[in-house]
Image (cartoon, grey):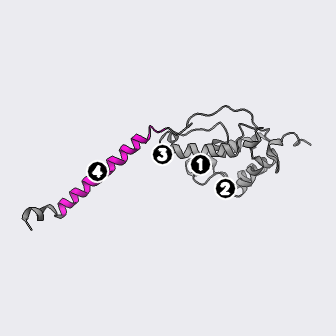
Amino acid sequence: MTAGTASSSTPASRRGNARRIAAIALGGVIGLLLIIQFIPAGRAGANPPVLAEPVWDTPQTRALFFRACADCHSNETVWPWYSQVAPVSWLIVRDVNEGRAKFNVSEWGRPEKNEGDEAAETVQKGEMPLWFYLPLHPEANLSPLERQQLIDGLLATFGSEHGSERGDDKHD
């Protein structure tokens, strides 16, 4: 073994190599994050028009719904700043599109888009709002009383079988 070979594998030189590799890796990650900003996420920041809204049983039900549910279940999404940053933007757009496809109060009267009969049930089971939505949207974290008021209001607004038909018979 030569003296030059032995000195190139000293602990100090290995630390230097590790730092260089870490710096290159960090630079690569930062570069990748910058590049993916140019990959479109879809409609983040844009909302389609509101076509029709259900006849809410009370203004309170509507307010609770818009506070806890409307970002994903209406065309009145409030897009936070981070919804413009990939790859988070891709996830948010996907979640909003899925939520609107399942249940959208801004396109009321289109039965294929309105499963209002399931709205109260998902809130009651604790399935909505989604757990990962709540940390960044604390206003959607309803108290037990507010949760029950929302459930009762959703049942009164949408009924238990035909949510898109509700409104004509609720005053009988």
Q: Considering the numbered disc 1 on the image, is that residue within a helix, a strand or a loop?
A: helix
Q: Amino acid at mark 2?
A: Glu
Q: Amino acid at mark 1?
A: Pro
Q: Which marked residue is nearer to the observer: mark 2 or mark 1?
A: 2
Secondary structure mainly formed by the magenta segment: helix
The tag on residue 23 is 4
Q: Which residues are magenta?
A: 11-39
Q: Quadrant of residue 158?
A: top right
**Residues at marks 1 and 4, CA–CA distance in whole angstroms:** 37 Å
**Which of these two is toward me, 5 or 153?**
5
Question: Residue 29 in magenta?
Answer: yes
**Residues at marks 3 and 1, CA–CA distance in whole angstroms:** 22 Å
Q: Quadrant of residue 107?
A: top right
Mark closer to the chain start, 3 or 1: 3
**Residues at marks 4 and 2, CA–CA distance in whole angstroms:** 42 Å
The tag on residue 87 is 3
Task: Give the labeled residue for mark 1.
Answer: 138
Q: Amino acid at mark 4?
A: Ala
Q: Which marked residue is nearer to the observer: mark 3 or mark 1?
A: 3
**Which of these two is toward me, 137 or 82?**
82
Quarter of the image for the C terminus: give it. Answer: top right
